[in-house]
Image (tube, rainbow, N blue to C red):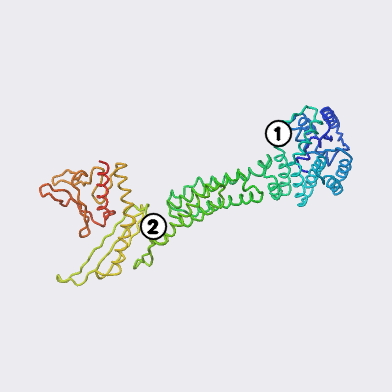
Amino acid sequence: MTQTLSNNSFHILGLDTSSSQKDVSKRAKEIINRLKIDDKPVYETDIDVSNALRTESSVKEASERLQLPKKRIKEYFFWFQIADDIDERAIGHVRGNEYDQALAIWQKASDSDTAKALFYKKNLALLYCHILGKEDNKRYLQDSLQAWSDVINSDKFWSAFSKLYKLHDDQTSNQEIIDDFRGQAVAFLSDIFTELNHTYKDDNYINEFQKVFSSKGGKMEKTVLNPIYATINDAVESLEKMKISEDGVFDKDEADVVKKSVATIQSELNRLIDLGLYDDSQSKLMRDRAANALRTVVLDLHNNLNELNRSKKLLEAAMQICGTDSLRHKLKSELEQIDKNINEDIENSLSLEIPGYGGTIVFKNTFFVWGGKKVSYKDVTAIAYHSTRHSTTVYSVSVSTTYTYETEIVIGDDRVKFSLSAGSDESHEKETWAKLAGLLSHLIEPILIRKFVERIFDRGETVKIGYVDFTKDGYSYTRTKFFGGKVVESVPWDKDIYTPKFDSGEVILFKHDAKKDKGVQFASVSMSNDNAVIIPELVKTCLQTVLSNT
């Protein structure tokens, strides 16, 4: 017998549902008094009553429930109603554990559309539940649900039930209480099938119930759904707390957290599918929250680490689990954009084999890969490239010439450096260096300039390249006087500004000479200095910023 039926007040007190309040009080006192002298009462109306069922506390609680109108009607509905000889014969077989005979009697009696037949059918449905509490029988599960559906969905039954209940209830029950119970009957019934689910650890009991009634009661919420939602919530919070791009890499530990969280969410959602509750309104909200948590991870991986393929897989997972169409459309649009970005990334990928280094550097839209390490362009702090020519002479006669081509990419304290040498001015090494320099200029230089302009004009910082300082007021350097002391030489942004030029491995900055009415050399910075090669574009961008702010 299920817990709901076993703990039914009429069952505990050994009374028929037609018993009056006076009968209830009298029986409760009788049982309690007999228990005090260790006398375990047995009544002819008992059905599978164990000694452990009747205790002083359980009897008091049963009596109290029958005194409260809203609780009494539930006890009344979920117990056998013995109204005539047919019911007497059937319940007699139940007490003798002769269930097949009892089923046969009530099945035959309920095979019509009369109000009386519907009361037989309610007894039949209760008997199915009683038997299911003893054995896992899938045919009885289906028959039980069909019987309950026929009863609960019948206006004819509820009309007759209302009249009969008012006849048996000496507490002047009103129609409002009956109507209220009718609205909750399915939720109360779901508690019985939730108990069967726990007894046999078989989600089919809840799933089949959902197919028929699409409703859930307090026990299903508390003992089935809430633990599932809590597990999903923990996994979602693990995803929401992640700050993957903070250290600039998506490492194994972070990947494991994402993988474990996604697996947990999918496992619990599969449980909801098994229970038939996957499309429940509350489940849809939880599914949306899980999908949004995955989306947050996707945005971080995509926007900050350029993990396009991983982003796509996680967004596909988010689309599979999301609960509402509005979110699904949003995720679909974002997935289409990621697919577009992946295709563009493939098309715009460029690989350069570095002579003498036994490796290839690969440039993508937002990062490059060298030596198995991926570096985002936004993490680069400096670039440099320059070439030198070395001649060997004998008696003032040049006998050999070598060319060296240097390239450096600085990432904080780390440096990626390539030094290529060639014996002639036209060489594969020079061609490779020129391509590298062009890529750095095209892909990384604009990012560095944006950063420096923000530092100079938004934060009021000084950016130093070589010995030249760039500030919101202009560019300058400090020199030492011949006889001691220092003086600052500067070129303000509001004066005539000339674009710096490259010349023989140097970057030349200019100032305006009023007497000559032209630009003259102000300073020179070796191209071997970090970021010297970006000075021309930096000066132009700074000037544009000043002009746009005036």
Residue of label 2: 365
- Percent coordinates x, y for residue 526 in the rendering: 23, 56
Q: State which tag comes first along the sequence, 2 or 1.
A: 1
- Percent coordinates x, y for residue 422 in the rendering: 27, 69
The foreground one among 442 and 69 is 69
Is 101 placed above or below 56 here? below
Label 1 Cα neighbours within 10 Å, binned few <14 / some 14-19 / many ≥20: few
**Residue 180 badge:** 1
Given the image, on which type of amino acid does mark 1 rest?
A: Asp
> In which image quadrant can residue 59 be found?
top right
Please report the residue visible at 36 percent of the width from the left and 65 percent of the height from the top.
352
Is 270 placed above or below 173 here? below
- Percent coordinates x, y for residue 464 in the rendering: 27, 48
Is 486 positioned to the left or the right of 176 in the image?
left
Is 93 positioned to the left or the right of 125 in the image?
right
Please report the residue visible at 80 percent of the width from the left and 40 percent of the height from the top.
115
SS category of the residue bearing label 2: loop
